[in-house]
Amino acid sequence: MTKNNKSVITRRQFAASVAAFSVAAPNILRAQEDLPARETVEIRTNNYSNRSWQEHFSSLRKGAILVDTQGRTLHYWPQGEAYHKVFPVSVPLTPDLTRLGRTSVTRKRVGPDWRPTPSMLKRNPDLPEYIGPGPENPLGTHALYLSWQYYRIHGTNDTRKIGRQSSNGCIGLYNDDIEELFGLAKVGTQVLLI
């Protein structure tokens, strides 16, 4: 739209631009801060779209988490829809490792420990049997346990995985992001993976 030969932007266009920048900028900056000097990693968030919770959930009772495995993003809405958060994630390596559908948060844990699943050990018998909480733990600093056995939404000790197909089935976030989501989500928060 032009007015007196000057470009005019509507309030809606301005709000959309600010919203898009505010979603992308912190994660891009965080990704750059986490990288060693002179190393670059392409963060892939394919098919990113601003999702509406009404398309996927009947209510926001206890909040809602939508994981878009194609877009490699996690969307969170709190009960009451006061805001909408979007986080880049790592997703499973292959379709056969990817579980889609409805589940919920059944447990929350700070400093999770890790044991490989039987199928992980079958694929890679050299994996350690156990890793306790700490910087070497593949689950990162926080974990949201889901009603599906062995499936979690968790942090990661390897930030190169974010935005990629790189997990054995779980959904991984930057440790800062999972800490934030951990504080927001509740036991009982509904989760949908699409």
Image (cartoon, helix red, strand yellow):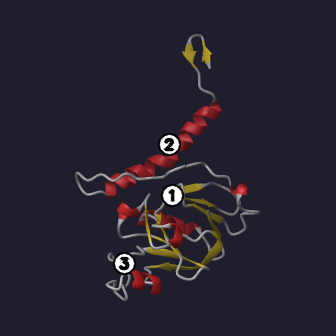
Whichever of labels 1 and 2 marks the residue nearer the N terminus, that label is 2
Q: Secondary structure at mark 1?
A: loop
Disc 3 or disc 1, which is closer to the eye? Answer: 1
Task: Give the CA separation, mark 1 to mark 2.
Answer: 18 Å
Between circles 3 and 2, the one closer to the viewer is 3
Q: Position of residue 172 (x, y in %)?
A: 46, 67
Residue at horizontal 60%, vertical 37%?
15
Residue 148: image quadrant is bottom right
Find residue 112 and report its horizontal and vertical position in percent: 44, 81
Q: Nearer the viewer, residue 10 or 104?
A: 104
Marking on residue 21: 2
Q: Are marks 1 and 2 in contact (CB under 8 Å)?
A: no
The mark nearer the N terminus, 3 or 2, is: 2
The residue lying at 40 percent from left, 69 percent from top is 156
Locate residue 102, reporting x and y percent: 66, 71
Amino acid found under the numbered disc labelled 3 = Asn
Q: Is residue 56 left or right of residue 130?
A: right
Which labelled disc corresponds to residue 99? none
Q: Work out whether mark 3 precedes mark 1 in sequence or the reverse, and give the earlier one.
A: 1
Q: Which residue is mark 3?
A: 137
Residue 177 seen anywhere in this rendered image of the structure = yes
Residue that mark 1 sits on = 72
Which image quarter: residue 135?
bottom left
Please name the amino acid that badge 1 sits on. Answer: Arg
- Alpha-carbon neighbours of circle 2 within 10 Å: few (<14), some, or many (≥20)? few
Disc 2 residue type? Phe
* Residue 165 point in image, percent of width and height: 44, 62
Of 125 and 72, the residue lying toward us: 125
